[in-house]
Image (spheres, grey):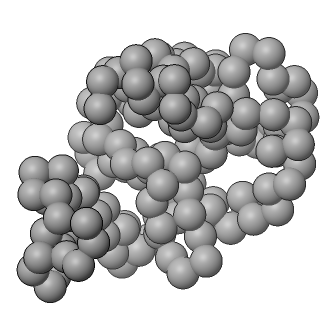
């Protein structure tokens, strides 16, 4: 898909996630969008840093989007740093001070406030890092070999 086509079709939160991922790359982080660290949780962006650090970024495109998110505190147990990503028009005073803040658009982002560092337990870090690697490899496989399931061979989908 061409860049212009993605931007035209994407939802506001997806555009923020795109800019966040591009910015994380400038900090030498690999990033995955829509990652499931545990059953019942789905984070917008997870980043894996050069020293194994794990950051989670939740992208909020509006006040209503933020106010309807009642499970974000459950993500704190799955990362070393937690951030909100919003656009420049978002009322940032709504966001908790004890979390990180990123201002983003579809092309880039800027870390305005660094989230406090909370070190993950080594066992959880290992599980998350392995899950991150498998998830990234599976997504790459799907891009390189559309229509073929990594687990079961050719898919039945058209």
Left/right placement of residue 39 relative to residue 35 reads right
Q: Residue at image x 16%, y 82%?
A: 151
Residue situated in front as seen by the camera: 148 or 36:
148
Decide: is 91 above or below 120.
above
Which residue is the extreme one toward the front? 158
Decide: is 152 above or below 117.
below
Q: How many marks?
A: 0
Q: Residue at image x 45%, y 60%?
A: 35
Residue 19 in sight in this render: no
Q: Residue at image x 24%, y 57%?
A: 139
Decide: is 150 above or below 54.
below
Left/right placement of residue 69 relative to residue 35 reads right
**Percent coordinates x, y for residue 113 in the rendering:** 65, 25
Residue situated in front as seen by the camera: 70 or 154:
154
Which residue is the extreme one toward the bottom? 152
Q: Looking at the figure, which quarter contains the N terminus?
A: top left
Q: Residue at image x 59%, y 70%?
A: 41
**Percent coordinates x, y for residue 87 in the rendering:** 69, 21
Q: Looking at the figure, which quarter contains the C terminus?
A: bottom left
**Percent coordinates x, y for residue 97 in the rendering:** 81, 36
**Percent coordinates x, y for residue 84 in the rendering:** 67, 38
Residue 48 in sight in this render: yes
Residue situated in front as seen by the camera: 145 or 49:
145
Left/right placement of residue 134 relative to residue 148 reads right
Q: Quadrant of residue 30?
A: top left
């Amino acid at each position: 898909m061409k860049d212009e086509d993605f931007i035209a079709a994407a939802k506001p939160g997806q555009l923020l996630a795109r800019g966040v991922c591009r910015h994380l790359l400038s900090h030498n982080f690999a990033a995955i969008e829509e990652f499931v660290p545990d059953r019942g949780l789905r984070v917008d962006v997870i980043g894996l840093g050069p020293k194994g650090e794990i950051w989670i970024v939740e992208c909020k495109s509006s006040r209503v989007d933020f106010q309807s998110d009642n499970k974000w505190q459950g993500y704190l147990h799955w990362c070393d740093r937690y951030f909100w990503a919003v656009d420049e028009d978002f009322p940032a005073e709504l966001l908790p001070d004890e979390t990180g803040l990123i201002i983003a658009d579809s092309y880039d982002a800027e870390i305005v406030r660094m989230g406090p560092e909370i070190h993950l337990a080594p066992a959880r870090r290992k599980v998350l890092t392995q899950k991150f690697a498998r998830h990234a490899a599976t997504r790459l496989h799907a891009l390189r070999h559309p229509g073929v399931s990594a687990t079961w061979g050719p898919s039945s989908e058209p």
